[in-house]
Each structure stands twice: as structure tokens, then as C-alpha cells.
Image (cartoon, rainbow, N blue to C red):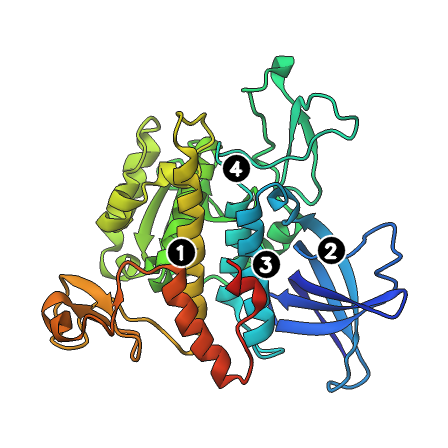
Amino acid sequence: MKLESTGILIALRPFGERDSIGVIFTHDYGVMTGMLTGAQVARKNKPLVGQVGGVSWNARLDSQLGAFHWEAEKNMAAPLMSDPRTLGIMNSMFALIAALLPEREKYETLFIRTKNLLHSLAVTPLGRFATTPPASGGRCDGVFDMLGPKARLTPLAGGAPTEWARGVNRCAPQAQVFAKSLRKNLTKHEAILWKNLSGSNGGFDFVKQMPIGNYIADFVNRKTKLIVELDGEHHGEQQQIYHDAVRDKFLQDSGYRTIRFWNDAVIRDLQNVLDNIYYYLTHENEIPPLQNFYPKEVIDNHPPRSLCDHSPRKQGETRQSQDDKKNLYLSWEINFLADLGYALDMSRCSGCGKKDSLNYLSPKTGRAVCDECAAPYLNRLHKLPLTLDVLKKFLERACEQHGITLPVARQML
């Protein structure tokens, strides 16, 4: 039998003198383990932890270990090597996936979150993609384009170190393949909107599921560079909100404008959606107010600029960038726990149902507790906001139920 997908190489250990056992987190089949023949002696296409690429798994029987054919397209770990903290986050994330997820069980949303987080970690405190110095040890007058299938050195105009150029309109091959699949399988809401946008809308043509860099935009008017996005309920999750903010900032830096609508708006108020789209089509200089989409508390605490800004930062902003990455990882762990069946509910008080003054979390139920209900039990409750130490306790409980200890990479974080 043969299984094919795209994946992230999350673990690698030697097997004999030439081969290795690899663990790959795939988009279509979840965690898979198999033999990588000749991995230790390979000179070309050498497997390395952190690579993203295409994978095929072959075996005569489903119960066999099987063998991988691995085609690496990009090394997501390379930009993290110069920062011990981001490298530690990646190692912790990979260790948790390998230890707690069952094999060959699909976790498509988690795979997308994991890949997006790796992409976000690769952004340096200056908001630029991390690079490696030239082999000669001389001055680096370019930046590696991490959006294509391979790193590419793009010369800078005049060699000025503050002028950064990236091939932002190039798209990775896997994005092209995925976009083609999405065009054939539009959701119900996308099909309705596409029916009203296709052909022309007042003389403005749209294309559907267009790859831009590593992202795929739902509907794009290339003449006015307006992107129309339809978002489902998962876009209200904290991790996805952060990802959308990073994505919108990247697209804005690439010259695009993004307008977002919830899926149900297409059913409930289609004419209003079309009117809004037409307005921004005819007002090319106006940027849609994304703050209308992102929840107020996210805009107040994590404005899109702080998540991925490609402009030079002021002195003292490096710490904020590290905090952003930590918050992104916290959100990833919260959603990871939910996928394991340990969802944390911080929407209302577990005692009285109130939605305000939620400053504590129950270690038993994982539900929020308001100040009034928490008063008699302060020494037993976790204080909000969540920290890595608090999430560590929930992860330890999940590991205990699986009969294992918390991975060392997570303990060291």
C-alpha cells in the first residue's frame, strides 16, 4: 500500500550505520513512522528535523513499519538556530506531537497551526525572515526568500543593510497544489459568493483560491489587489486570530488589501456583503478596517503590527517580539490540549456562569472561575492569564493518562 501527503519531519533517530527512523507529521494522515533509507549518508536531499516537504509511505501491509520517500522543500528549523528560545519552542512542539498523538489519525487543523507557528517563529525581532551568514564569512547583502520551495538569495538595492527585498508574490509548489484542490472543493458559502463574483462585478474580475507566498486567498481581484476572505468559526480561536493577523500583515506588505466576512453573513445578508466588496473595489486607496473582524481584546493586547512587522522597529521592541512568539506558542498548546480532549473553557465562570472578572482557572475542570466564586479556593486555583507553567500541569496530566512522562523538551522550555 502507498500513502502520499505533505508533512513536517518532527523526529529522526539512527538505525544502523546508514538508515534512520523518521517521524513525520502529515497533513492527511497525522503522525507516521517509517524507515528513511540511507538518511545518515545522504549528500543530497538529506533529511533534517524541521523540514517541510512531500512524503510517500510504502509498505506491503498496513501493520508494517514501511519506508518513506522524502522530498524536502523547505527547512523551517534553519532560521531558528540562532535563537535558543524559538528553537526550544519548536523542539517542545515536535516532542508533544510525537509523544501524545496517535499514529495515522488525521489532525488537519493542528497540522496547519503547527506549520503557521513555525513560519511565525522564523520572523526575527526586526520582523524579517532569519538568514544565515555567507559561507565566506563576509557581509551578507541579501535575504533568503523562505516562501519558495528553496532558500533563494535576493540581492538588495545598493547593498544597504536596511533595505530588504523578498519575493513575496512567489508561491510554494505545495500551495499551488493545495489551491487547485480548494478550487474544486469550494465550501457551501464560498460557492454562493463565487457565483456572485465570478465573471465580473461592475467590471471587476475575481479569481478564486489564489496562492500568494505560502498563503491561499479565497477570492482576489488582481486589478485593485483586493482580497475577500470568508471565515468559519475556527477563525475565532486565539491561535487562528494570531495567524490571520500575521497573514494580513504579510499580504498588506505585499500590496494587497483584505476584507473579511463570517460565513453566515453570506447566507444572512448577501447583499450587504456584495455592497461592501463593491465599495472597496471602487475605492482603491482605502484599507478595510480589520479591527472590525478581530475581537477588541486581541486588538488591544496584540495589535497586528506587533505580530509581524517588516518595518524597522524602535529601540526596546525586541522583548515584545519574544513575548509575541511565546503567546503564539501558548495558543498552540491550548488548541493542542483541546485536540487531545482537554479543552480549557475560559468563556464563562464554572460556578455562576458570569463572563466578566474571570481571573482564575480550575486545575481539575480546566474552566474559568470569577473572583467571587474563587475567593474560598484561592490557594487551589491557577491565576490567569495562562502561563507555560500552568499549561505544563495539564500536559503532565495528559501524559499520565497515556502512561508516559512529559517530554524533556517541554520540561526544559
Q: In front: 252, or 270?
A: 252
At 32% from the left and 59% from the top, the residue drawn is 236
Label 1 packing within 10 angstroms: few (<14), some (14-19), many (20+):
many
Q: Secondary structure at mark 1?
A: helix
Q: Residue at position x 64%, y 49% from top? A: 77
Q: Which residue is mark 1?
A: 240
Can you identify the residue that label 4 sits on? Answer: 124
Which residue in the structure is indicated by mark 2?
A: 48
Q: Position of residue 138 (x, y in %)?
A: 74, 22
- Residue type at numbered disc 2: Leu
User: Is 172 left or right of 38, judged from the image as shown?
Assistant: left
Instruction: Answer with mark 4 or mark 1, whichever residue precedes in sequence.
Output: 4
Mark with earlier residue (1, 3): 3
What kind of residue is marked 4? Thr
How many numbered badges does the structure rendering display? 4
Q: Quick one: which residue is furthest to the left in this view?
A: 372
Label 4, label 1: how far apart the Cα atoms are = 20 Å
Is the residue under label 4 in contact with that under label 2 (CB below 8 Å)? no
Where is mark 3, residue-wise? Answer: 91
Query: Measured from the top left, where is residue 174 in percent x and y?
Result: 64, 53
- The answer to whether residue 295 of the structure is visible from this angle is yes
**Position of residue 116 in the picture relative to residue 334 (left or right):** right
Label whose residue precedes the other's in the sequence (1 or 2): 2
Label 1 near label 4: C-beta < 8 Å?
no
- Mark nearest the camera among 1 and 2 is 2
Mark 3 or mark 2, earlier in chain: 2
At x 17% / y 71%, what residue is drawn? 349
The quadrant in which residue 13 appears is bottom right
What secondary structure is found at the residue carrying circle 3?
Answer: helix
User: Marks 3 and 2: which is nearer the front?
Assistant: 3
Is 284 drawn above or below residue 409 in the view shown? above
